Image (tube, helix red, strand yellow):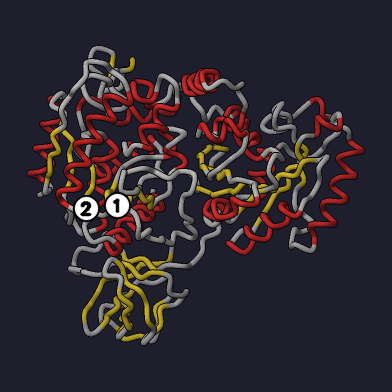
Amino acid sequence: MGQRIPIVILGEKDHGKSTLLGRLLYETRTIPQDRLREIQKAVKTQGGSFEWAHLLDSFRYERERKMTLDTTRAVVALGKNLYEFIDVPGHKKLIKNMMTGASDAQCGILVIDIKKGITPQTIKHLEIAKFLGMKKAIIAVNKVDKVKYSAAEFKRAVNIFSKALQKYGIAEKTLFVPTAALQGENIIKKSHKLSWFRGPTLQRAIQISFKRAHRTDNELHISRRTRNFKAVCLFVEKPRKNLLLESHSQILPISKINEIKAIHSVETTSFQLKKRGTPSEKFVIKTNGKIIGICRRAL
Amino acid sequence: MDELIKKSVFILRKARARFKKLAVLWSGGKDSTAMLALCREAFFNTVPFPVIYIDNGIDFPETYALRDQLTKDWGLKMLTAKSVIKTDKISGVSCCGANKTDALKKLVAKEGFDGLILGIRRDEHGIRAKERVFSPRDAKWRWDYKNQPMEVWGHVSIDENADHHRIHPLLHWREIDIWQYIWENDIPINPLYFSRAGKRFRSLGCTRCTVAVESDAKTIPDILKELGDTKISERMGRAQDKEAQAVMERLRALGYM
């Protein structure tokens, strides 16, 4: 199995984030048939009509108000990779829930309604996601059915959007993909309604743009397979890339800040004393004279 | 697979550091058994906290046998919460809600646990997909799903007003990942998952509300292959997920697992 790559779906409320993801889950057959029927039945008993967003919006509260309250995730296999799609709420007041979802993703799909265009909330989402660690993005220019799948309208929108987004760090080569999430156009299959469009479907764009998971080096892990050291403390939380001698780190599960007293390399048999341990190597750390285990590499 | 394990081990170790009195729930199923194995990975071949098993008296004999085997082989401190079936009606809220949750409540109050580790996964159910890794429950065991805490970069904020926290180290696993893990690590598993007379269980509850699905899968590789092709969901055989879908939401709001 390939890599597992988290992708957050960003954008203003009602621009179609949940619908886009719901449709993607349906077209890739990620949602089993019986669960789809179960959801359709449930929506009916709750007195509404079925929408693609209901595959993600599972609280009654969300369905009644036609909005996403809290973040959800679904894993989809596309090609050789697994993509973990993260849906987030678009409402201004729900930024805390949006951040919870966005903080795990280094890739993002920014959804923009072609008619409503970029709003302050679109920019806010983009900036927060970037701050939290997003490195790459795709822009889904959604609801192209509202402009009758017009090539000229799409071109015009891309022109405006790319100019406006440039100062927020959206690179020139970023892919802009026309989509009609509600109708499922250009999500997985090429759309004949968009036959003028030479670019990729959303699925292809994801596969082209997001090829690997960008790891953050927040944590140093101690080898879980190590048995020769009876370790009490097992994990160093959020220090830095390199573990430095005499630095202070929080070590789990003891949860005390400990001073690193010694770092020994274990690449050689002689346990060489070192000034720092880098994420790529194996080493033993000591605090207050106590050996606490072998570190392997950063997550 | 390594990434999945690492993430779970991190959550478990973090939980161990942050909570005073932890317990892990074991149901007899594949997820909670895999969870015990992950605990053993995180804490050097031990499970350093009690394992809670809710016994309603009508679980499968295979489940009881596995409980005894694991208790012995892995040296578990097994706590049994006896639940009483009060109704003949097979229904999510009155049965699972009243029986299992009440029994658990009593035990947790008696022992004073402040953290409960549960093996729920996002891909099981839409409501479970909305959960946080560390999720507070109030004095009445309610889940305030309209106002969940923020979890950024895996950092945890503990809610001091909470009665206890639910800890969900398996949220990011899928059904097929669990089977892969069980297969690679040779973890003992409930034999009910394997096909007998053309049927097997895909999800396990008590004898009353769990239904077997048609399958010829007799081994774990068979199951892995079957899951690759299937178009039917895992919890299809579970009554509490049916009826109006809000059953699960109401159950969870009341403190169900």
| Pointer 2 with pointer 1, Cβ within 8 A | yes
Residue B247, compared with residue A85, is above or below; it is above
Decide if residue B35 is in sight here.
yes
Left or right of A227 on screen, residue B147: right
Spatial distance from mark 2 to mark 1, Cα to Cα?
Answer: 7 Å
- Give the x, y percent position of residue A201: 72, 36
Name the residue tied to disc 1.
B164
Q: Residue at x 22, y 84 (%)?
A: A289
Mark 1 packing: few (<14 Cα in 10 Å), some, or many (20+)? many
Q: Residue furthest front?
A: B140
Chain letter of the residue beneath label 2 in the structure image: B
Helix, strand or loop under label 1: strand
Left or right of B92 on screen, residue A184: right
Q: Which residue is drawn at 30% across and 63% down?
A: B18
Identified by mark 1, the residue type is: His
Residue B113 disc label: 2
Count of number-bearing discs: 2
Decide if residue B238 is in sight here.
no
Identified by mark 2, the residue type is: Phe
Residue A289 disc label: none
Q: Residue at x 43, y 62 (%)?
A: B155
Depth order, front residue of A147/B187: A147
Residue B8, compared with residue A84, is above or below; it is below
Asked which quadrant contains residue B189, the reply is: top left
Helix, strand or loop under label 2: loop
